[in-house]
Amino acid sequence: SALPARALEETETQPPDSPGRLIVFAGAASQPATSEVAHLFEQKTGMKVDCSFGGSGAVLNQIRIESFGDVYIPGSDDYMDIAEREGQTVPESRRIICYLTPVICVAEGNPRRIDGLRALSREGLRMTMGDPGSVCLGNIAKQALERAGHYGLARKNIVTYASDCQQIASLIRLGEVDAAVGYDVFHFQSPDDMDIVSIPGIEQVNIPAAVVTHSTSKKRAREFVDFIAGPHGLKVFAKHGYRTTPQQ
């Protein structure tokens, strides 16, 4: 959700001894862990951390339009590449937090016997997909299905486009859809509500963090990036099922 313009004014007019606050724009893929790390950072520094979660492209758009924010944490590295190219983030502040593998998420027990991407084009299957262009998983799903030659038919099975990664997980958990391309961590976070099917040859992605160029608290923003990508942050991410080392 958009933060009011006055938030920027408050950040700029804080008294020098105020611990202040940081605005973190993050893709929803990291929401459970990022929220917890933000709370730990607040306890450690006294600095308030406000997290705004959504599709990685959607929150990047907010940074663009409002020239506002302190830290950007997209759900995959491709959105950070875009932010860097556009000059929205400080390249030397970029750190990798964790690694995710795209998989097919299905209802627990896999009642529709989905065994791969081809099965997503089966007639009558209900599917969700992240909105390509604003959700990292949307781009990943579209590219994977296009490469496999199944996108045209699978697209007809899409009953709703999800606005962020957590919505994809939620639709599977609630049984609203039969399948979706999601992340392996979704299963760890909801083991009783979904199963996963691997996608051969798909590349893992990483969740990076970087300081936003427009930040008025760059030193503190850099501290937060180093904190979330350091031992304290990684411990929280591992607890929530995120892999903190790349898969060989």
Image (tube, helix red, strand yellow):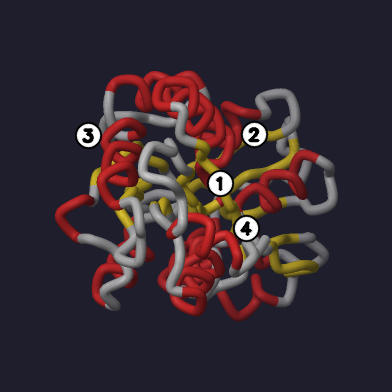
Q: N-terminal of the two: label 2 or label 1? A: 1
* Residue plotted at (77% across, 67% down): 160
State the residue in front, 99 or 247.
99
Q: Of marks 1 and 4, which one's residue comes earlier in the chain?
A: 1
Label at residue 148 = none
Q: Is residue 154 left or right of residue 231?
A: right
Q: Which residue is mark 1?
A: 51
Cα separation, mark 4 vs mark 3, equals: 28 Å
Q: Which residue is mark 4?
A: 164
How far across and down, in percent of the image, does residue 86 sit? 29, 78
Front in this rendered view, residue 188 or 178: 188
Quarter of image, res 234: top left
Residue at mark 2:
195
Task: Identify residue for label 3.
Answer: 248
Q: Position of residue 197 (x, y in %)?
A: 55, 41
Q: Are marks 4 and 2 in contact (CB under 8 Å)?
A: no
Query: What separation in Å lies between label 4 and label 2 (alpha carbons)?
Result: 20 Å
Residue 162's x, y, as percent? 69, 62
Q: CA distance from mark 2 to mark 1?
A: 29 Å
User: In the rendered structure, which disc, 3 or 1, sits on the residue that comes first in sequence?
Assistant: 1
Q: Is residue 84 visible?
A: yes
